[in-house]
Amino acid sequence: MSTPFSPPELERYARHIMLREFGGPGQQALKRARILLIGAGGIGSPAALYLAAAGVGTLGIVDDDTVSLSNLQRQILHATDDIGRSKLDSAQHKLAALNPHVKVEGHAVRLSEANGSEIVAAYDIVLDGSDNFATRYLVADLCEDAKKPLVQAAIERFSGSLTVFAPHLRNAAGEPYPTLRDLFPHAPPPGSVPSCAEAGILGVIAGILGTMAATEAIKLACNLGDPLLGRLLLVDALRMRFEEISYGRQNPAAE
């Protein structure tokens, strides 16, 4: 059910509503949407800010960490005064100040097989900005089981990648869209890929990928444009170069 926009909402979202491809129906779709963010860190920070600014009705955030000084170079949802504060508390305060029309639901847990199914089931779309392979594969499996579209972004040093998984949907040829394991059958061995604490990270690459991930989530919520289904977008910030790799089901005939 759609609820009428209040005068402040109409003014706030006027530039969206003016878009012919978006308009009032798109804004209403955003208002109804429930989007879950995995992590309020480098990718989750800009994604949360832009999704809240855009008028997503409900934002869920999963994060059990606290703000540290080294986070602030890239995690723009948090500020110096937030050091030592839970990232969820910091996020809820900032997002409420940005847009009081958005409901923020916090999940102060580390996502696991035990709690993940219930959390993911409560949302329409999941945006994964986690920083480890175990969580990425877990989130992908949870979303596949729950038939929820997943926007997955990752960053490393000066680069990043972005794609969308929705294996419960089918393409124009009637084939199911691929899964994470169709793209990467196995996670790299532990320790083979250094963390950002070990290798460093250019702060703005988190902003680039987080904002692009938010764009994909908005497109999914509003059935707008062409999401990155079966397409992996690679971003090289040093050369400011974008490349796209298409991928599909490893064995579509078995479906």
Image (cartoon, rainbow, N blue to C red):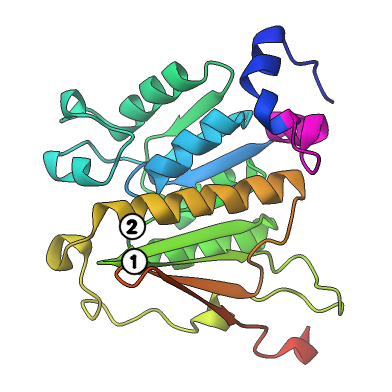
Q: Which residues are magenta?
A: 17-32
Percent position of residue 35, x then y? 59, 41
The crowd level at tag 1 (other Cα within 10 Å; few <14, some 14-19, many 20+) is some
* Secondary structure at numbered mark 1: loop
Question: Which amino acid, by three-letter code, is at mark 1?
Answer: Ala
The disc, 2 or 1, on the residue closer to the chain's N-terminal end is 2
Residue 247 vs 227, above or below: the answer is below
**Residue 179 appears in the rendering:** no
**Residue 147: in magenta span:** no
The reply to whether discs 2 and 1 touch (Cβ–Cβ < 8 Å) is yes
Question: Which amino acid, by three-letter code, is at mark 2?
Answer: Ile
Identity of the residue drawn at 58% across and 49% down: 215
- Please name whichever residue, 20 or 91, is drawn nearer the observer in this view of the structure: 20
Identity of the residue drawn at 60% across and 53% down: 216
Name which quarter of the figure residue 147 lies in.
bottom right
**Label at residue 205:** 2
| Drawn side of residue 76 relative to residue 37, left or right | left
Percent position of residue 210, x then y? 44, 51
Label 1 belongs to which residue?
237
Q: CA distance from mark 2 to mark 1?
A: 7 Å
**Residue 19: in magenta span:** yes
Name which quarter of the figure residue 10 lies in.
top right
| Drawn side of residue 241 relative to residue 117, left or right | left
| Drawn side of residue 69 relative to residue 203, left or right | left
